[in-house]
Image: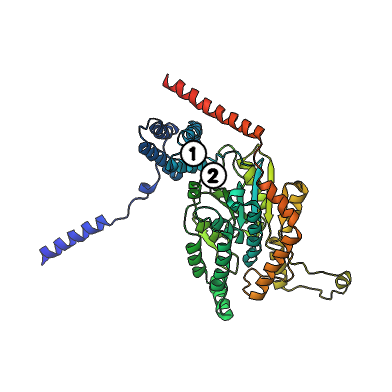
């Protein structure tokens, strides 16, 4: 018996030794010197240059993409090793090799490199938040597509959306490329599934989870419709515009905007706004549309997100800043800012004089603060003062009835559509002017200058390679 006890004790000790916790130092990421990192990246680049076959070159390109995605802090080192001129050379050489072009396009997005706009300047689409009032935006974009004869994502260089605008944006761009008719029916189906519930059940859920509606159901629907494709992967479609989705960080010392991008800012010109391209489309939409009291907040890493409309319900100013970061020398040519409709009841002077309420309840005060924070017209006033009428187009229909963001009443939604169609008919000349600006091609002089700049970069790379070889 004593011998058996001794054996059992030794076996238990061995098992404990096997399951002992791994020391903390094993999880610490090793720190490499600048020279070592430069050598790693240089070896990958040389593998691309010296590849003997298309398959070998594609494998090395994918290796570089994976390395820079997992080690974004090394993008600056790679850029200083003339990686961008190398990729430009390869793109010209491999113009018929689609798999290689897709990887190269993703690498350009990681470096923050962009080609010159296809029009005479930068074309931007900005879409406000507003819940179910996003139907108004869908109807206006449908009319723009009819005028131009092209898909919306092919007409703009950068598309920026917040809240409901984020949903529309992610459905419009690759890989989904949904038609606006499909997005319209998606809205109607989602509203019936998410915004229809018992008020008592919603109130009880609001108490324990701070969300009136079923967030799990909302997330499941978003994953079905938007999917979990990485934002950076949207660049595999060579016609995909730059995409910026806005949310609000709420666990910082103060609330600040956060940008979900399908590109990185150029290393020599960083954006003023926090953001990243290492997110999925689902994460971007879920965070941007996390309206307080409607859905639960959303967490990515250590960052807690709520609806982007809390900070910038009209993201036009952010879109301009992001575009200026990417195209510092290009002029703004066509900026389209789509609102989700505004309801402005007429207030007479005698009504103001006869106001009898002398104090406000806490609920009234909070409602007014929320209305002020999500107001979109202040940004519109600022943009119209800064930009000319030939460049800046604000599309925001007047509504005859107030429509809330979670409204599912068929009659009110029908009136919303009718108000939008009436607005389009009354402003037909504005839409035609906008359409002409969007399809205007780049001038011959601009194309010549672009080609000269490209040849300058390619010549610089060629001379550097000759110098290294010698």
Q: Secondary structure at mark 2?
A: loop
- Distance (Cα) linking label 2 and label 1: 10 Å
Task: Write down the residue under mark 2.
Answer: 264
Q: Is residue 224 visible?
A: yes
> Taking 313 as reference, is 232 above or below it?
above
Question: Which percent across, then down, holds residue 371?
Answer: 71, 65
- 458 horizontally vs 324: left or right: left
- Seen as rendered, the residue at the extreme top is 470
Task: Give me the disc on residue 75.
Answer: 1
Q: Could you tell me if the residues under marks 2 and 1 are in contact, i.e. CB atoms within 8 Å?
A: yes
Quadrant (top left, top right, bottom left, bottom right) of the C terminus = top left
Query: Hey, which quadrant is residue 14 in on the image?
Result: bottom left
Query: In the rendering, at what x and y percent does residue 89 appear?
Result: 48, 32
Viewer-closest of 174 and 330 = 174
Badge 2, how many Cα within 10 Å: few under 14, some, many 20+? many
Q: Residue at x 66, y 75 (%)?
A: 411
* Residue located at (47% from left, 54% from top): 229
| In the rendered image, the vertical position of residue 67 relative to residue 168, given as above or below | above
What is the tally of numbered marks visible in this picture?
2
- Where residue 51 appears, as percent x and y from the top left, is 37, 32
Q: Earlier in the sequence, mark 2 or mark 1?
A: 1
């Amino acid at each position: 018996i004593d011998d058996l006890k001794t054996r059992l004790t030794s076996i238990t000790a061995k098992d404990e030794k096997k399951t002992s916790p791994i020391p903390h130092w094993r999880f610490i990421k090793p720190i490499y010197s600048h020279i070592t990192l430069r050598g790693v990246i240089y070896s990958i680049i040389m593998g691309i240059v010296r590849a003997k076959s298309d398959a070998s070159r594609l494998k090395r390109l994918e290796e570089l993409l994976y390395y820079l995605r997992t080690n974004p802090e090394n993008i600056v080192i790679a850029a200083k090793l003339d990686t961008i001129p190398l990729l430009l050379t390869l793109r010209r050489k491999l113009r018929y090799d689609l798999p290689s072009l897709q990887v190269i396009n993703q690498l350009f997005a990681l470096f923050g490199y962009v080609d010159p706009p296809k029009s005479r300047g930068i074309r931007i689409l900005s879409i406000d938040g507003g819940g179910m009032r996003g139907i108004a935006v869908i109807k206006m974009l449908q009319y723009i597509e009819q005028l131009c004869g092209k898909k919306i994502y092919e007409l703009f260089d950068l598309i920026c959306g917040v809240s409901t605008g984020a949903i529309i944006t992610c459905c419009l761009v690759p890989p989904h490329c949904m038609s606006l008719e499909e997005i319209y029916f998606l809205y109607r189906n989602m509203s019936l599934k998410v915004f229809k519930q018992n008020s008592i059940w919603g109130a009880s859920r609001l108490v324990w989870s701070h969300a009136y509606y079923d967030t799990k159901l909302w997330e499941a629907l978003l994953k079905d419709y938007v999917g979990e494709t990485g934002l950076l992967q949207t660049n595999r479609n060579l016609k995909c515009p730059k995409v910026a989705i806005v949310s609000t960080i709420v666990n910082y010392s103060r609330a600040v905007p956060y940008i979900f991008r399908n590109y990185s800012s150029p290393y020599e010109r960083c954006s003023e706004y926090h953001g990243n391209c290492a997110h999925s489309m689902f994460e971007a939409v879920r965070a941007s549309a996390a309206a307080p009291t409607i859905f639960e907040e959303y967490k990515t890493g250590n960052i807690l997100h709520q609806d982007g409309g809390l900070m910038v319900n009209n993201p036009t100013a952010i879109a301009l800043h992001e575009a200026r970061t990417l195209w510092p020398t290009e002029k703004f040519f066509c900026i389209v800012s789509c609102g989700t409709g505004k309801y402005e009841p007429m207030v007479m002077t005698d009504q103001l004089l006869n106001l009898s309420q002398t104090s406000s309840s806490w609920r009234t005060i909070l409602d007014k603060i929320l209305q002020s924070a999500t107001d979109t017209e202040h940004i519109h006033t600022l943009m119209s003062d800064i930009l000319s009428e030939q460049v800046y187009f604000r599309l925001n229909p007047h509504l005859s009835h107030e429509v809330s963001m979670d409204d599912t009443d068929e009659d009110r939604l029908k009136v919303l559509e009718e108000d939008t169609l009436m607005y389009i008919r009354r402003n037909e000349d504005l839409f035609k002017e906008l359409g002409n600006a969007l399809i205007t091609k780049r001038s011959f002089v601009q194309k010549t200058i672009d080609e000269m700049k490209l040849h300058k970069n390619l010549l610089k790379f060629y001379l550097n390679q000759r110098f290294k070889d010698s």
